[in-house]
Image: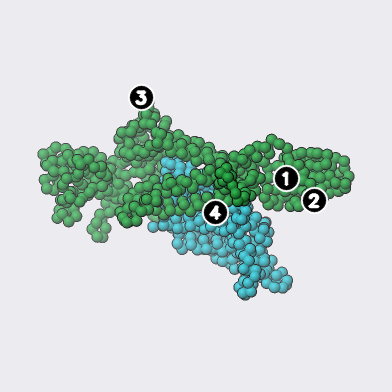
Chain colours: A green, B cyan
Amino acid sequence: MSSSLQSNVSHGDEIRSPKLGFGGWMRWIWSQITSMRTALLLLLLLAVAAIPGSILPQRSADPNGVTTYFQNNPQSAPILDKFQLFDVYTSSWFSSIYLLLFISLVGCVIPRIRHHWDALVSEPIDIPRSLARFPAKKTVSSRKADALELVGSTLKRKRFRVKLTPTGISAEKGYLRETGNLLFHVSLLGVLVSVAVGGATSFSGQRVLVEGDTFVNNLAGYDSFSPGAWFKSESLVPFSVKLDRFQAIFDLKNTTNVGTPLDFRAYVSVKNSANAVSKNSLIRVNYPLEVPGANIYLTGNGYAPVLTFKDADGNVSFSGPVIYMPQDNNYTSLGVIKNADAKPAQYGVLSFFYPTAAKLTTGALTSSYPAPVNPLVSMNVYVGNLGLDSGIPSNAFQLAVHGLKQVAGGKSGTKALVLDTIGQTIALPNGLGTVTWDGLKRYASLDIDYNPAQGWVFGFALAAFLGLAASLLIPRRRVFVKKTETGLELAAMAKNDDPKLDSILESLTESLKVKKK
Amino acid sequence: MTSVVLNPILDGYALYAIYGAMALYTVAFLLFVWHLSRLSAKGKKIQATALPIQRAALGILIAAAAIHGAGAVMRGIAASRVPWANMYEFSISGSFMIVAIFLCAWFVREIRVIAVLVSGFALLVLGAATTVFYVKVKTLMPALQSYWLVIHVTVAVLATAFFNIAAALAVAYILRSWGWLGKSKLPIAQLAKRVLSVFPETKKLELLSYRFNIIGFILWTFTLAAGAIWAERAWHRFWGWDTKEVWTFIIWVIYAGYLHATSTRGWTGVRAAWLSLVGFAAIMFNFTIVNLFFKGLHVYSGLK
């Protein structure tokens, strides 16, 4: 698995015996798996296998994309799904490639660790009988009796490990190259294990928090929650976060840039445990809030108009802030109200919110700026059974209008309802009662994540990086010096091409000449 | 940040500087071609005229790089941030880095002949940047407001530049080791052979390409790791198989394959060189096709 060294360890290419017993076959298979060629082919295979996950939507990164893909390609999607093409990076075929790669790595690295350890604790190898075939050679005539010792001490100064014998010198440096190489590969293994452990012990949850609301860290506090396999809900630290105020800053000054978000700021009060003192804090994009047992990230924001629905008798059927999902950069937002408690009939509302309402030439409404300069709420009303009592889970942000009767907006004959002033009350059609726009709040979408193995992943990644740099940048060199009748014969070699060899020998002989004076 | 002042007028001047650099790159490119043709011509007398041409070309290349660099800096000042937050800016900064690194490596005599490829490539990238990728100065979206934009992207640009020079050397290496060119009697093959004879010998080209690739690989590894750290801050997870993450990974694995190939019997030489070209093709794919057409979180082209 070396990236640049020709291995000294057998890689199995030599075994070509036609008749093998069971043990022989096993050894042959093992040597094939751990060969450099196999590692190379597995790497290329891994690169190719990763491609489909970037073309097809993946459940992990883009679950809505997968749903849409199934709707648009009802024929091919189930077949692709059978081959796990919407879960490429957890698929059995992708996993088997990288697991084989890591088996190959282990099989290759273990003998090399042993070999390198031997090299580290023992002296440089014996001087070869002939220095004729070395890439760098030099002979120098010297009558000095201590010529060998002089060269030896120069080599030591150059941080070579030196073995001095009466007839010559064997010197070597750059052991760190192989150390780095092994550290890199072992650290990759560490990254893989930490990622796996992290995946099993971590959790990730989402919560949409309207200004004034408080999130308490227990399972009931989450809108959605995905734990790892070994996660235990008792381990949730009971901290709480209250969203005091959400601020979105948009550019008004630069003409080419009007409406571009400059900053999103969630001002929160945090209690690290149920009885702790509340502390003020700020969450921004790129600057998550770190609390014991979790990090809290700001991932989205929008408007939550506060609405009150009353029936014809004045009884309140719904009251509170409604989360509207932004649909464009100017925060034209879509909200859904399912008023299941309304009397005499259930009704649903498909509503748009325009922070700065403007009319298009077609007469349709749009938003021209993301801050609430001229806010407006429009509503389409649908009467009928909302299906909330059937027990089938439904998406809170979607209204299945099929089977419902539209009574306001669209082709219903009645115009869509419009609220353009906060505090305004208007009547609903068909004697359904009234709606009041009480106020306008903002909300923040928060991600609450915890991965206890994150530090390990980072540590191993750092070790891998340092190991890689050492294994590619530090040269490993051997120098041999032989005493001849007229002087010294020097030769040098490196584990890969090394243009500096000649200059090293040059400097060795230079030092000899200087000493002569 | 709560308030930023953009300077579209300065950005206009920056764009003129980029156009000026393109004009000079064109001249430098043509001079380098002329230099190669002189050098590969028959007859010592003609060959002797090559050196002054190369000197002139180098002078113009340096001038082009200086104006190019000034253009990138002005764009950064106009936007009051680093000039690599969208495709246009990444293109002008990245191609500047390629030329700058090449000029720094000019003292390596063997590398000088790829000046044709470097100046031609810079011209091509700037052409695409000004015609296809150009967007007006914009402020940074909150997700990009992080010091990691400086660290992660600078190193990615550097890695790309090193891989680019290595790929240019690999092209020269593959052509020089192509047996057909040596044997063919076709006039075009004869001409190519003469031009290639100016290039360093194959062993030197292979070694130089390897050198640039290992630096590129170390920097790319850093890019990947720094990207993961930033992703944890910005997107609440360090790795999520976003399309850009996938392609960064694919590129890393291809170059890891290349490094293994350089010490695997039967894979050294031309095969390894091809792998290095496949790796660079993946980088270009990642920068263009993935940026523009793939869905993902790294949607920073600024193009609609």
Residue under numbered circle 3: A275
Disc 3 and disc 4 on one polypeptide chain: no
Name the residue at 22% across, 40% down.
A391
Label 1 and label 4: CA atoms lie apart by: 34 Å
In this rendering, position of residue B166 left or right of residue A59:
right
In this rendering, position of residue B248 left or right of residue A123:
left
Label 3 and label 4: CA atoms lie apart by: 53 Å
Q: Name the residue type under label 3.
A: Asn
Q: 10 Å neighbourhood of mark 4: few (<14), some, or many (≥20)?
A: many
In the foreground, A117 or A331: A117
Residue B141 placed where, x, y %?
Answer: 41, 48
Cβ atoms at labels 2 and 4 below 8 Å apart = no
A90 over B301 or under it: above or below: above
Q: 10 Å neighbourhood of mark 3: few (<14), some, or many (≥20)?
A: few
Mark 4, secondary structure of its residue: helix
Residue under numbered circle 1: A478
Mark number displayed over residue B49: none
Disc 1 and disc 3 on one polypeptide chain: yes
Name the residue at 64% across, 42% down.
A178
Q: Name the residue type under label 1.
A: Arg
Label 2 and label 3: CA atoms lie apart by: 79 Å
Residue under numbered circle 4: B160
Q: 10 Å neighbourhood of mark 1: few (<14), some, or many (≥20)?
A: many
Q: Evaluate whether residue A459 shows in this view.
A: yes
Residue at the limit of the structure toward the top, as seen here: A275
Label 1 and label 3: CA atoms lie apart by: 67 Å
Name the N-terminal-most of marks 2 and 1. Answer: 2
Name the residue at 42% across, 41% down.
B236
Q: Looking at the image, is mark 2 or mark 3 nearer the viewer?
A: 2
Mark 3, secondary structure of its residue: loop
Where does the N terminus of chain B fall, quadrant-wise? Answer: top left
Name the N-terminal-most of marks 2 and 3. Answer: 2
